[in-house]
Image (cartoon, grey):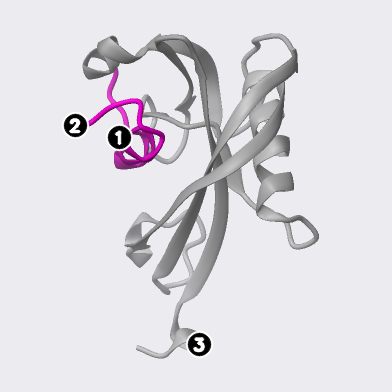
Amino acid sequence: MEYTDYDTRLASYAVVTDGDRVLLARLSWPDAGLWTLPGGGVELDETVEEGAVREVLEETGYDVVVEELLGVRSHVVPPERRKTRNGRPMKAVQVVHRARVVGGSLRHEAEGTTDQAAWVPIDELGAHRHGLLVAQALRWAGVTTE
C-alpha cells in the first residue's frame, strides 16, 4: 500500500512519574475505560514536545516540562475502528517523552477524549485496564521490566 492510500496520525505522549506512581488518563473514546499515558494528536503548527505539553495540561491539569525522548511506536488502525469513517486505514505514530510536573493541579478533562486523570501506583497497573503504549513506555523509561 502506498503512503497516499492511508492516513497518518502523529501523537505525542508523556511518561510522568512521582516516586512509585505514574500519571495516567482514562479514555472516554474510542476505548472507554482504558487507561493511557496523557497525550494525543500533535497539531500542524506544533513540535512533538509542544504537543505533549499541551495534551498533558488538557487531560490532567498539570504543566510539564518535556525531558528526553523515550521512544517511538507505530501501529495500524483499521478503517472500522476509526473515529473518521472514511474507509481508509490509519498509521498511528506515537512519540513518547519523559516529562516532569512544574505546576498546575490534578483535574479531569472536560468534554475531551479522556474523562479522568489519576496517579496510579505502578505496582497496581494490573488492576487498571491499560493500553500497550503504557507498558512499552514504562519499559523505555526504565520504570518496569515487564
Whether 101 is drawn above or below 121: the answer is below
Name the residue carrying label 2. Answer: 146
Q: Position of residue 77 (x, y in %)?
A: 36, 61
Q: Position of residue 92 (x, y in %)?
A: 45, 60
Q: In the image, what residue occupies the spot 37% across and 66% down?
A: 79
Q: Residues within 10 Å of mark 2 (few under 14, many from 20)?
A: few
Q: Secondary structure at mark 3?
A: helix
Q: Is residue 88 magenta?
A: no
Q: Residues within 10 Å of mark 3 (few under 14, many from 20)?
A: few
Q: Secondary structure at mark 1?
A: helix
The residue stretch that appears in magenta? 128-146
Quick check: 101 left or right of 34? right
Quick check: 33 left or right of 84? left
Name the residue carrying label 1. Answer: 135
The mark lying in front, picked from 1 and 3, is 1
Quick check: 37 left or right of 131? right
Q: CA distance from mark 1 to mark 2?
A: 7 Å
- Asked whether disc 1 touches disc 2, contact meaning CB atoms under 8 Å apart, the reply is yes
Name the residue carrying label 3. Answer: 4
Q: If you read the primary sequence from the N terminus, does the residue marked by circle 3 or circle 2 appear first?
A: 3
